Amino acid sequence: MRYRVALALAVAALWHEPVLAGPSELDRLLGTWGLPPADDQPGLTGSYLALFHTDDGKMRVDLSVNPQGLSCDSEREITWNVAQKRFEWPNESKTVKGDACWLTATPNGTGLDLTVWCPYECTDPEPLQIRLDRISGEHLIPPIDTASTFCSSDDVLRQELCLPGAAQEAVAKVSRAGAQVSVLSDDRSSPQPEIKIVMLDVLRACHARGGDRKCLLEALQSRVEALETAVAARQRQLAGELRASEAAAVVAENAADQKIWQGVWNLVNDEMVGTLTIRDCDDHGCTVSIAGMTNYVFGDQNRQGSCLFDDATMSYLPAGRAFAYVEPYSGDENASDAGPLANFCRLDLERIAEGFRVHLRGAGCPLRCQEAAVALSSLSGDYRPRGRPGFRCAEDTTTMNWDEENICLDPELARLDRELAAAYRNATHSVAAADRDELVRGQRAWIEHRREDCEQSAKRRTCLVEAYQTRLRELAAR
């Protein structure tokens, strides 16, 4: 509140009673006004206002005003309220009453005094006031995938990028080729820079050389050519890898070999609980699915992060290996026109002494996850048979408490639970009858604290292992 009062006092000291613009004065307002963004700062900075006529003669506003601590954004058709002498558009707020959002725009020397009120589209329900500079008499339009405030500058080269034409077409090609590189990548850990960063690099380089519009076009075209070359090379590499895998595929004519693959295995680590299902095996391969759910601080009720790789066709490879490509969702096929392997997701499997080792890679794999992308890589790992702890496990482990589910699915945790059960039995037989009740209460308290303490841990499985090891030492010391 102190900030708002201070802002109002500061504005009042500068402001004069506005002479509101009417339709006859619109020509003075048409074009672009703004304050340059701080390109070296994160987030949306700068302020931008464009007033312009559409092809059918209607008036539109493109507005992004961002003084410190406040913001207001709108892009829509507006009307002139003669009685109120202001531009208006519908107020869609359900909490702050008002018939219409509005703005007044008053020329002041070479600048513009702007007042905006729109509780639905602004972060502050109070009228927002700001002084903007004339940037251009034209309607500057930001290039593809760029915030409108990018155009809030009187820099000549930057304005070349904000006018439709050859420069923006080149920017669009950079964006398209960059997207193709991303959807063909092994993963999304090294994404292409956002288009704003690319344009800022081009601007800096051309300014340093005293360049002009030609410099912009040449620099952008150079990036397009480099990206398109990388895309073509990557397409050849992935297609060659697929052909090589298909050529190396073997036939498992022996029914016993096929049976070795078929079954259900589980993975438990600090981030994920996963299930690998291999079924319907024949001479040439099987159907493989992986389902994973996050295993960290979401807790039981809100454990929403999940991944599903359903019914992929798996082919055998020599030496107990196999591979499968998950079919992309229909919307991901040929994403960004990157070809048939766009957003690919490949599974590589290898038989190990007890179960299977699985590796997932491909930019399309995170698309199979909901709210769990941070844990996706943890689905890669060793999948083993269900554990056999010292207590009975439900057939559907998702109905169990999270810690018991971990123990039932993880052979190492199950082994620790069996050891603890044996140690506890030995302790109950060795202590005096008077101390037995205390031992029972201590064991029950340990189980309760194990669940509660490890539920809040960022490394749940590790916490369970350490809890068991600590309790085993305590029982051994009795």
Image (cartoon, grey):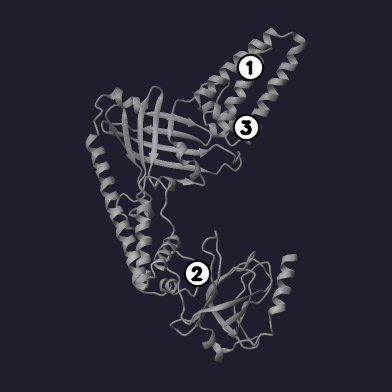
- In three-dimensional space, the C-alpha distance between marks 1 and 2, rounded to whole angstroms, equals 63 Å
**Badge 1: how crowded within 10 Å, few (<14), some, or many (20+)?**
few
Image mark count: 3
Query: Looking at the image, is mark 2 or mark 3 nearer the viewer?
Result: 2
- Which residue is at 55% across, 63% downward? 44
Q: Residue furthest right?
A: 434
Return the disc, 2 or 3, that comes first in the chain's sequence: 2
Q: Which residue is mark 2?
A: 148
Classify mark 2: helix, strand or loop.
helix
Q: Which residue is mark 3?
A: 454
Q: Quadrant of residue 265?
A: top left
Q: Amino acid at mark 2?
A: Ser
- Determine whether 295 is above or below 356 in the image: below
Does any portion of residue 275 appear in the rendered image? Answer: yes
Q: Quadrant of residue 24?
A: bottom right
Q: Which numbered disc covers residue 473?
A: 1
In front of the other: 459 or 132: 132
Q: Which numbered disc covers residue 220?
A: none
- In three-dimensional space, the C-alpha distance between marks 3 and 1, rounded to whole angstroms, equals 19 Å
Q: Position of residue 56 (x, y in %)?
A: 44, 84
Q: Amino acid at mark 1?
A: Arg
Classify mark 1: helix, strand or loop.
helix
Classify mark 3: helix, strand or loop.
helix
